[in-house]
Amino acid sequence: MLKRLLASREALLMGAIVVLLGLVATRFPSFITPSNLAGVFNDTSPLILLAIGQMIVILAKCIDLSVAANLALTGMVVSMINVAAPGMPIAIIIIVAISLGTIMGMFNGLLVWKLDIPPIVVTLGTMTIFRGIIFLISDGKWVNSHEMTAAFKAFPRAEFLGMSMMSWTAVLAVFIFTMVMTRTTIGRSFYAVGGNPHAATYTGINVGKSQFWAFTISGALAGLTGFLWVSRYAVAYVDIASGFELDVVAACVIGGISIAGGIGSVGGAVLGALFLGVIKNALPVINVSPFWQLAISGSAIIIAVAFNAQANREKGRIILKSAENAQ
Amino acid sequence: MSTSDRIIPDRLQSSLQRRVKSWETLLLAVAIAIFVANSFASPYFLNAWNLSDATFNFTEKAMIAFAMALLIIAGEIDLSVASIIALASTAMGAALQAGAGTPVLILVGLGTGLLCGAFNGVLVTRMGLPSIVVTIGTMSLFRGISYIVLGDQAYRGYPSDFAFFGQGYVWWVISFELVLFAIIAVIYGIILHKTNFGRAVYAIGNNPTGALFSGIRVQRVKFILFLLTGLMSGIAAVCLTSRLGSTRPSIAFGWELAVVTMVVLGGVNILGGSGSIPGVVIAAFVMGLVTFGLGLLNVPGIVMSIVIGALLIGVIALPRIWAMWRYH
């Protein structure tokens, strides 16, 4: 029982986060008050949402580097809609954001599915294309706080049972996608596709189509996050969330999702995101210069990868392994 | 990203390999078309000094792209190259503060590059970790160390003879960087296409297990390739620092993706196993010409990225769309 618990990456990661919180608390006790922890969760919500989408894409043996650009483009479009039509209800804005993100995800997915272009090439291309489009539609101008309506800015901040709507959105997404990944055919097919594409094909799963849906889900979540991001920070410009795609991939890797596909869980992605979120929020509190942040998260990624590789080491093929190690 | 993960059916793989020969031709046609379009679009384009300036857009990135091409052909990737530039540049700045002269500065730059490459190489080959994640980690780590050392400061005041590497001209409009780019291109062309080491790189990319059993020291070759991307990043750091005359931790931000784009545009299969140095050279010129031509037309840099992105996807997609249209 204990052995099985120790072998579970989620449990280990949970332990690591608790230890991390404990260490921070020795320096700064009020960090672990419920209200502060709720704040940390709120700050990490965008990362959680994107990490869930990225996890599904990575499970299906792909990678989506365009999520941050998708988020930024959707954010710019909805904030421009808000400026042009201040009376538009938030519900419609959210639907627009999700649809726009979905379309961008589908575009990635179609290129991977129908044209067989490697996902890293597709999303590298669409990443730059999406960012460029933001500049074209906005003319490089910012949409500032005073131009947005109060209702637009209020949504992610609105409190319900002590947590913001932004946090609740993340909680809801975690719940929905846990169900999708463990209880539905499409969810299981992502694991099959990533675990062994050839076997998946023989069992009647369309590999390309599953990858298409993985990109679509990732795009939809990025679109939703785009709205939450601009309304929370009350500003939209070309470079928002620049470089965030690597944080998202990092969260997945720390969460034990195998970059080779087929292994991972929603819980892992969420815990990976929270691990990064706690580090990010704790550094300034315990008087570590923010300049250390990149180096620390980089080290965390490398350690997590090394740890995962150790845990996943294959037991078979002894001869080949010893041949490889003999060099 | 190891080659055992490839998901493209063999059918497409082999047709792609057969097309590699014509790939360079296609790319060359694109380059010539852009060149002609540029000369019509702006009266300032066909000027020797302008054309020479245009080369600065790609020479530094292309130096790294050659080493990256070999690495990608062998089925690995190095996303930390831009961060290695930042760290090497920071190390040079620190050496400068300590009173080092130009020769020492260069040694420090190249040495830092090699060390970073060795670090990546050890993690990938000794510990058996996937290179895409390792280098995402070291990408943050290396740049993070630059931030720790520099904070929001900048190093300035490089000696005047150091400026030669990024600003000097060897003959008339031929800059030192352009000459260096040409020499490096020839060296990599010979390594990849004429030596046993080059054959080993292709063999590893196509079938690592097969390569291992045919006596190729797979891990050692991969380690050398990581050393090479580190070294080339160090060389690029010397050139870039010399050209800018200062070091900031944000130097060369986002270059890793530009370098990978250049390599893929050059016809190197991102899944490993095929590609050529002439292809990368032409791709470097294409990207340089596009950026420079659009710049003359006052198109903002961010809009150029739409063109680069579309070019990247388009060049790969068009032959496949063409094939689908013909055979279905």
Image (cartoon, coloured by chain):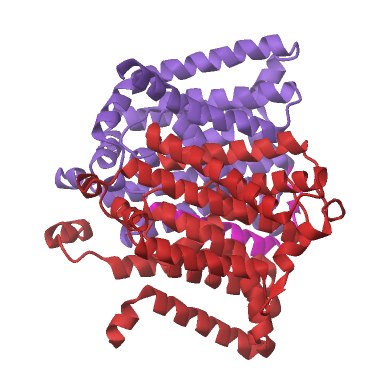
Chain colours: A red, B purple
Q: Quadrant of the C terminus of chain A?
A: bottom left
For residue A26, say whether it is visible: yes
Q: Quadrant of the N terminus of chain A?
A: bottom left
User: In the figure, A17 relative to B196: above or below?
Assistant: below
Q: How many marks?
A: 0
Q: Is residue B145 magenta?
A: yes
Give the side of residue B203 with respect to residue A52, left or right: left
- Outermost residue toward the right in this view: A146
Q: Is residue A97 magenta?
A: no
Give the side of residue A148 with respect to residue A71, left or right: right
Q: In the image, which residues are magenta? A: B131-159
Task: Out of B68 and A298, give the one closest to the viewer.
Answer: A298
For the point 26% across and 28% down, the residue is: B14
The x and y percentages for residue B310 are: 55, 29
For the point 55% across and 38% down, the residue is: A126
Task: Out of A7 and B215, give the one closest to the viewer.
Answer: A7
Q: Main secondary structure of the magenta part?
A: helix
Give the side of residue A224 with respect to residue B202, left or right: right
The x and y percentages for residue B15 are: 29, 25
User: In the figure, B274 relative to A222: above or below?
Assistant: above
User: In the figure, B21 relative to A143: above or below?
Assistant: above
Give the side of residue B197 with respect to residue B284, left or right: left
The x and y percentages for residue B10 are: 24, 34
- Outermost residue toward the left in this view: A319
User: In the figure, A128 relative to A317: above or below?
Assistant: above
Task: Out of A33 and B19, give the one closest to the viewer.
Answer: A33
For residue B78, say whether it is visible: no
For the point 60% across and 28% down, the residue is: B307
For the point 55% across and 41% down, the residue is: A104
**Location of residue A42 by image quarter:** bottom right
